[in-house]
């Protein structure tokens, strides 16, 4: 990890009472935090589709797991559905950043629907790896969370029965493969770096023949946000993570802080914060999952300022400059 860089503090406290004699509430802001390149791209795909095709544009599943983002796009004319059956003929449909099983674009083609794939390129990379491993005759052990759309999408890249899910080290102990079975592992992109490392070590110990990517497939954004929390958490009394309850990478940020012994709370909006949370708290670490926009970070700081005079410091643990290309339909 790079040496953390701490920016000069500045105070925001517009709403704090003048009579507040307590020391300011220190807010350490994680950097990087919030939107990643895959989320930026997915949102831009919906926005550009609305410009190009006009409303409504249908989106299969929440484009990213954030209510604020989804509601903003709804207000611009996007309609969110869970299955293609809910999309009428003749309108464009966007697939979410989490990726979809192969059957979904196949179904869209069958129906003659114009579809745009907002699957994050880092998820698509895992899809291609899955195909290649199965072509090479290997059974895949996939590390991920049951039911998450990314997991459903990745399982849908290979024939049924060619991939087995493990969620924990205990699951690895229960695996039953013939001795010498040809095996490969792959992982979801938004997992806990530490948990995944332990699961992969257990897999390699039980099945030394297993092959896989040199590094697990946890994406740069997930891993950078977790590293930032590891630096912040020991310095604060409370960590606030802005993110959806169904956002895997946001939930992992809460876990990272808690494992370091710091109380952590997942919040969606500033209004979720209760004044009682700040009793006895001198410093807060603030971060946002990869699907949470910066406007919510400002909203949270505004909310904290209603209770106490706030002093912000940015703690930079990594620089990010990843950008993903848009699909050709939107750039030609
Ligand atoms: Fe892509 Fe990672 Fe962002 Fe998911 S969290 S959209 S895998 S960059």
Image (cartoon, grey):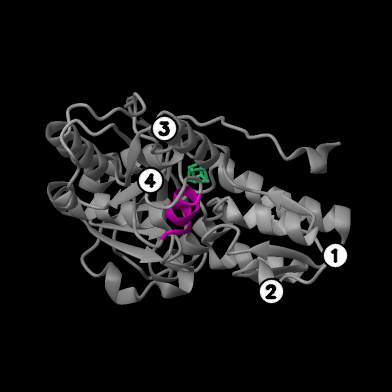
Please report the residue visible at 83 percent of the width from the left and 66 percent of the height from the top: 55
- Whether residue 152 is in magenta: the answer is yes
N-terminal of the pair, mark 1 or mark 4, is 1
In the image, which residues are magenta? 148-156
* Real-space Cα separation, disc 1 to disc 4, in angstroms: 35 Å
> Is 30 a magenta residue?
no
CB of mark 1 near ligand 1 (< 8 Å): no
Label 3: element kind: helix
Residue on which the image places disc 1: 90
Label annotation for residue 86: 2
Spatial separation of the CA atoms under disc 2 and disc 4: 30 Å
What whole-number distance in Å separates the C-alpha atoms at marks 2 and 1? 12 Å
Placement of the N terminus among the 4 image quadrants:
top left
Asked which secondary structure carries label 1, the reply is loop
The percent position of residue 59, horizontal first and vertical second, equals 68, 63
Marks 3 and 2, how far apart in space? 34 Å
Which of the labelled discs sits on residue 194, or is there none?
none
Q: Which residue is mark 3?
A: 133
- Label 3 vs label 2, nearer the camera: 3
- The vertical placement of 75 against 286, above or below, is below
Q: Which residue is mark 4?
A: 162
| Label 3 residue near ligand 1, CB within 8 Å | no
Between circles 1 and 4, the one closer to the viewer is 4
Mark 1 → mark 3, Cα distance in angstroms: 37 Å
Q: Are marks 3 and 4 in contact (CB under 8 Å)?
A: no
């Amino acid at each position: 990890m790079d040496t953390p860089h701490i920016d000069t503090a500045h105070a925001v406290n517009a709403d704090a009472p003048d009579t507040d004699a307590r020391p300011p509430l220190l807010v350490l802001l994680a950097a990087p935090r919030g939107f990643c390149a895959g989320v930026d791209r997915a949102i831009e795909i919906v926005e550009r589709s609305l410009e190009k095709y006009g409303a409504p544009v249908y989106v299969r599943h929440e484009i990213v797991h954030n209510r604020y983002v989804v509601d903003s796009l709804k207000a611009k004319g996007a309609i969110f559905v869970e299955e293609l059956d809910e999309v009428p003929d003749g309108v464009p449909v966007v697939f979410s950043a989490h990726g979809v099983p192969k059957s979904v674009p196949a179904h869209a083609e069958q129906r003659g629907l114009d579809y745009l794939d907002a699957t994050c390129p880092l998820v698509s990379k895992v899809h291609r790896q899955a195909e290649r491993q199965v072509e090479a005759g290997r059974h895949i052990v996939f590390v991920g969370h049951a039911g998450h759309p990314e997991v459903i999408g990745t399982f849908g890249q290979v024939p049924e029965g060619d991939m087995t899910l493990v969620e924990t080290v205990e699951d690895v102990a229960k695996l039953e493969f013939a001795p010498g079975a040809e095996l490969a592992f792959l992982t979801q992109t938004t997992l806990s770096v530490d948990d995944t490392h332990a699961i992969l070590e257990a897999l390699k110990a039980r099945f030394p023949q297993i092959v896989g990517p040199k590094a697990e497939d946890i994406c740069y954004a997930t891993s950078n946000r977790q590293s930032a929390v590891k630096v912040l958490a020991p310095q604060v009394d409370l960590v606030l993570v802005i993110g959806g309850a169904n956002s895997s990478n946001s939930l992992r940020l809460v876990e990272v802080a808690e494992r370091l012994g710091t109380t952590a709370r997942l919040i969606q909006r500033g209004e979720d914060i209760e004044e009682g949370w700040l009793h006895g708290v001198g410093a807060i670490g603030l971060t946002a999952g990869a699907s949470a926009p910066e406007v919510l970070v400002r909203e949270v700081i505004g909310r904290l300022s209603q209770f106490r005079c706030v002093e912000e410091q940015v703690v930079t643990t990594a620089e990010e400059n990843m950008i993903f290309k848009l699909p050709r339909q939107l750039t030609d």
